[in-house]
Amino acid sequence: MFKSIEYKLYLYTILLIAAVVISTWFAIQAQYVYMVLAALLAFFLLHNMRRSYNQFNKNIIFLLNALDNGDYSFNFAETKLSRREKELNQMMNRIKEILSRARKEVIENEKFLSVIMESVSTGIVILNEESAVVQINRTVNRLLGLPVFTHVNQLANIDRSLPDLFRNLEPSDTKTIQIANEREEMQLSLRASRIILQGRRLKIITLNNIGSELDYKEMDSWIRLIRVMTHEIMNSIAPVTSLTDTLLSAFRKDEPYEQDSLMQNTIEALQTINSTAKGLIGFVNSYRRFTGIPKPELNPVSLQSVVERAIVLEAVVLEEKSIPVTLHLPAQPAVRQLDESQIMQVLLNLLKNAVEALSGEEGRIRIELTEEKEKTCLDVCNNGRPIAEEVLPNIFVPFFTTKPSGTGIGLSVSRYIMRLHGGTLTHFTKDGWTVFRMAFYHSGK
């Protein structure tokens, strides 16, 4: 179709040149009548060529302007035209229909996304580079208590630090803030992501009310802790109460009693009470150790060196029990900001637990240090008997223990120390190995 227009222009150009040449030749021959006729023919050809070109340009410009303005109501005539012009108009009408359908699909997708945004309980804020609000959902208005939210500077009415927090929040960050509106106090978790849309750099911030979830977890933790503490205290107090009742009954009897027998029973009872009291004091001291962990003193520390020193400290026990330890440590030092003594305490506790979990000649321990994109992982693995399913939910609960002489604070203290370092301590099984993972996050967690 475009070629037909091109051929038409070529034909007009050739005829125009021919008419000019003929007109010039007649002028030389002094045949002025024919010269004028040839000149009129040249003018006619030039006019038609210009009209065809202008009409083509006019239609194209009209099409582009209409599409640019979002106007799809036009329609190019397809009758009473030459075959080539009809084909051209049909093509432009088809372009209009294709773009019109695409526009309708975009509008429908936008409506669909808008419905989804308004349906979720997560607040969604989209900011441009000037920190102006491009789009939000109703959840944001409800969480922040702002009927109208157009710029992050409005957040200063809630808390002066919030505007800078929203501006500086990066995709790798997770922030928790506490705010209060007219109805309640809330803890909000904030995360960010970035996209480029139509050449604009946008930041998407999500807000989640985690207060109820934290309250539930906190209450559940308290219930489990109180259950364990009650169990320990009752186990200590019950025999003491029973023994004192027995002694009081013996001394209150009116009938004669054998002095030596009563004295012996009294001594045995007092020894039992003394032993039980010492156990209760040990339990209280364990609680004191758990609640008295100091803030970490951070310094650059190589995790490889911590592992190697821990193996040296446990070497005697490992040799006595003939337990081989396999190390998988990268050649490049993994240096992190740590409190070396606290991390050593965690690692030694995990090694001690691994040794206690092993029995038989096939017992092995494996320690792996791996670097991932967002964290460094130190895994202490053993191939001993897996932890029982009914015990798993409580292994990190303070004072919970299945060992006759255990205090039940080793894993809970270890997890607490890891949290003080912005990391995590988790348990899982893999290929027959029981794994405790110390995760050190590069940007904090």
Image: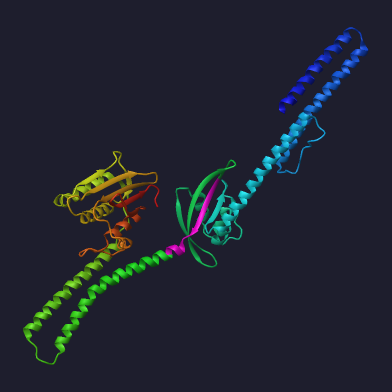
Residue at the far right in the pictured view: 33
Say which of 116 and 349 sits in front: 116
Vertical position of residue 178 compared to residue 27: above or below: below
Q: Where is residue 345 in the image (x, y as percent from the top left)?
A: 25, 54
Disc count in the image? 0
Q: Position of residue 79 (x, y in %)?
A: 80, 35
Is 118 situated left or right of 92 in this image?
left
Say which of 337 and 76 sits in front: 76
Vertical position of residue 284 compared to residue 114: above or below: below
Residue 302 seen in render: no
Looking at the magenta stretch, what is its main secondary structure? strand
**Residue at position x 86%, y 22% in the image:** 44
**Residue at position x 39%, y 46% in the image:** 374
Vertical position of residue 314 compared to residue 48: above or below: below
Looking at the figure, which quarter contains the N terminus?
A: top right
**Residue at position x 56%, y 59% in the image:** 139
Q: Does the magenta stretch include residue 355?
A: no
Is 72 situated left or right of 193 in this image?
right
Magenta residues (range): 202-214
